[in-house]
Image (cartoon, rainbow, N blue to C red):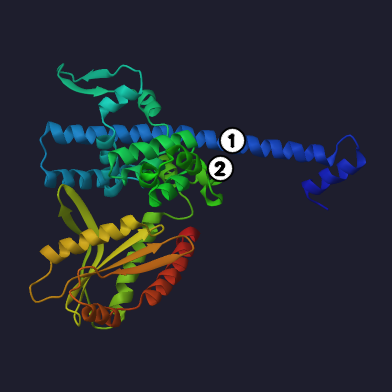
Amino acid sequence: MNSNHDKILILMKKNSSLKKQDYSYLVSGIQTLLEEARRQAVRSVNAILTATYWEIGRRIVQFEQGGKVRAEYGEAILENLAQDLTKRFGRGFSRQNIQQMREFYLSYPSHQIRQTVSGKSKIRQSASGKLVSHEFDMKTIAAAFPLSWSHYVRLLSVKNGHARKFYATEALHGGWSIRQLDRQICSQFYERTALSRNKASMLIKGSHSKAGDLLTAEEQVKDPYVLEFLGLKDEYSESELEEALIRHLESFLLELGGDFTFVARQKRLRVGNEWYRVDLVFYHRRLRCLVMIDLKIGKFTHADAGQMHLYLNYARKHWTHPDENPPVGLILCAEKDNAVAQYALEGLSNKILAAEYKTALPTEKVIVQELKRTQRQLTHRLSSGS
């Protein structure tokens, strides 16, 4: 018995006043104190993070409106900001993340801050005395957003404003974790509550968390958004993993034979005022159709299927030649210990064509096996720093 822990146990036996139970209470109390301190630290960081990202979104929108920027120029601004901020601050400022900040401000504009928080806005003036903007101090902004940034990112995917407000209110009142919020949105809790005759009962039932909803203090500290904001690294960067998976998947499909021909990576498309990117686009020579692949780090959701449906409709209308067959989509979702592959065959003219697609394309099982194998290798490589 050479460890300090063993020495303490020996002292306990010698000194009856130092009971083992008392020491257990000491350890338990300190552990609880540290876990709560970590949670408080994460809440404080999240408040500053959310307020900062709202202000970044406000400045982007103000810059666009002040210069009456056209949509295509607005896209270029996001691209340039992503490059410049990433060069200076590292992870956390991809084009998608900056787009989320912009959407965050548009979803929660300044007048809502005034309604939510009783505080006075400050007016900043340039050196020439010209009015530049209304600015809130960070404390005022933070007070208006009591949920974490992860919560608000998930809420931004809810396009119905009433539903978004409902989920935000229930998440705050019920103390929902991001997992619980995600589960309630995926299960259409808002719609089910709206249709229920006993709404009070539904709300009470929905406030109850399940075993998988709770986050430990360590998991909260390792929230990717918090780590990126603080410039810290976790075991690996999800963006690095996603990029590596896409590169490997591209090589894997090309090695399957001569049917797959590479077309593009991160191919852009515009629907209305929104820009999207398809991770990989191939052309299948035998099927004479485009194969569009979208990779997600995380579990498969209905939103993923809806987004792929949007891509396929766009590609069918704008990218498909008259003598070609309709495009096919492949959704890949890579979780930490799991992977899902699902083909999207919407819009095919008949069952025979659908059957031909399934015969010519690699099976979902084969792709999942390759995705899992590659993910394990890359995760080990990235976490070891090699």
> Alpha-carbon neighbours of circle 1 within 10 Å: few (<14), some, or many (≥20)?
few
What number is the disc on residue 36? Answer: 1
State the image coordinates of residue 256 (x, y, percent, origin top left): 31, 81
> Which kind of residue does numbered mark 2 sit on?
Ala
The image quadrant of residue 310 is bottom left
Q: Nearer the viewer, residue 137 or 206?
A: 206
Which label sits on residue 57? none
Disc 1 element: helix
Amino acid type indicated by mark 1: Glu
Direction from residue 38 to residue 95 in the image, left or right: left
Residue beneath the point at 22% across and 54% down: 276
The answer to whether residue 21 of the structure is visible from this angle is: yes
Q: Is residue 354 above or below residue 141?
A: below
Instruction: State the residue in front, 167 or 113.
Output: 167
Reading the image, the residue beneath label 2 is: 217
Residue density around tag 2, few if under 14, some if 14–19, many if 20 or more, within 10 Å: some
The answer to whether the residues at label 1 and label 2 have Cβ atoms under 8 Å apart is: yes
Q: From the top left corner, tell me how far across and down residue 5 is, in percent.
A: 78, 47
Q: Could you tell whether 109 is left or right of 194 in the image?
A: left
Place of residue 20 in the rendered image (x, y in percent of width and height, measured from the top left):
83, 41
